[in-house]
Amino acid sequence: MKDMIKTKKQLREELADLRKKIKDFENSSFDGPEALHELTPNEALYRLLVENASEAILVIQDENIRYVNKKATEITGYSKKELSSRSLIDFIHPDDRRLIPIDKILKPGSKTVSGPFTCRIIDKNGKTNWLEAKLLGTNWAGESSILLFLIIFIRSPTICCLYHL
């Protein structure tokens, strides 16, 4: 019974700790119910490869982001949850949106590969980053999807200016 009597300060500290744990969980690499089953050795290897790739890897369905790896969060500055709650087009620079052939690639049964091509994204801080993008039409969880690979370019301002000439 003695343990059940807590001061307001102790309760506030516990509440703050719980809120932090919830926020950490929401921003973690938890990928939904499919992540709850035990992985086969091949699944574990694929997950290890994808999560540690030097490219950002995203799965797009119905123009919405369904999966992102760790590198995608690094490039964009957004958490996995933040990325998954928005459309891919939201992150593409307005002048480059016409470059993304989503409709053509999302046709049922399409295995179309598009790219590599160069486009810009706007990260969480409003900074524009140049990327090389490659899209591949595929099936994911039984639905037409796009597998998107992104590599960030590190360019000098001079090269970026020349690129637009």
Image (spheres, grey):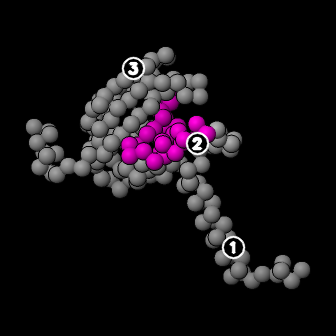
Mark closest to the chain's N terminus, 3 or 1: 1
Task: Give the magenta range.
Answer: 41-69
User: Measuring 58% from the left and 36% from the top, which residue is drawn there?
Assistant: 42
In the rendered image, residue 31, in percent from the top left (x then y), is placed at: 59, 44
User: Measuring 38% from the left and 43% from the top, which residue is drawn there?
Assistant: 55
Mark closest to the chain's N terminus, 3 or 2: 2
User: Measuring 11% from the left and 42% from the top, which residue is drawn there?
Assistant: 162
Classify residue 95 by image quadrant.
top left
Q: Secondary structure at mark 3?
A: loop
What number is the disc on residue 112?
3
Q: Marks 3 and 1, Cα distance to the nearest angstrom?
A: 52 Å
Residue receiving disc 2: 44
Q: Residues within 10 Å of mark 2 (few under 14, many from 20)?
A: few
Residue 83 appearing in the image: no
Dot 1 amino acid type: Glu
Q: Is residue 148 above or below residue 106?
A: below
Which of pointers 1 and 2 indicates the residue nearer the eye? 2
Q: Marks 1 and 2, Cα distance to the nearest angstrom?
A: 35 Å
Which quarter of the image is occupied by the N terminus? bottom right
What number of labels is visible? Answer: 3
Residue receiving disc 1: 14
Q: Secondary structure at mark 1?
A: helix
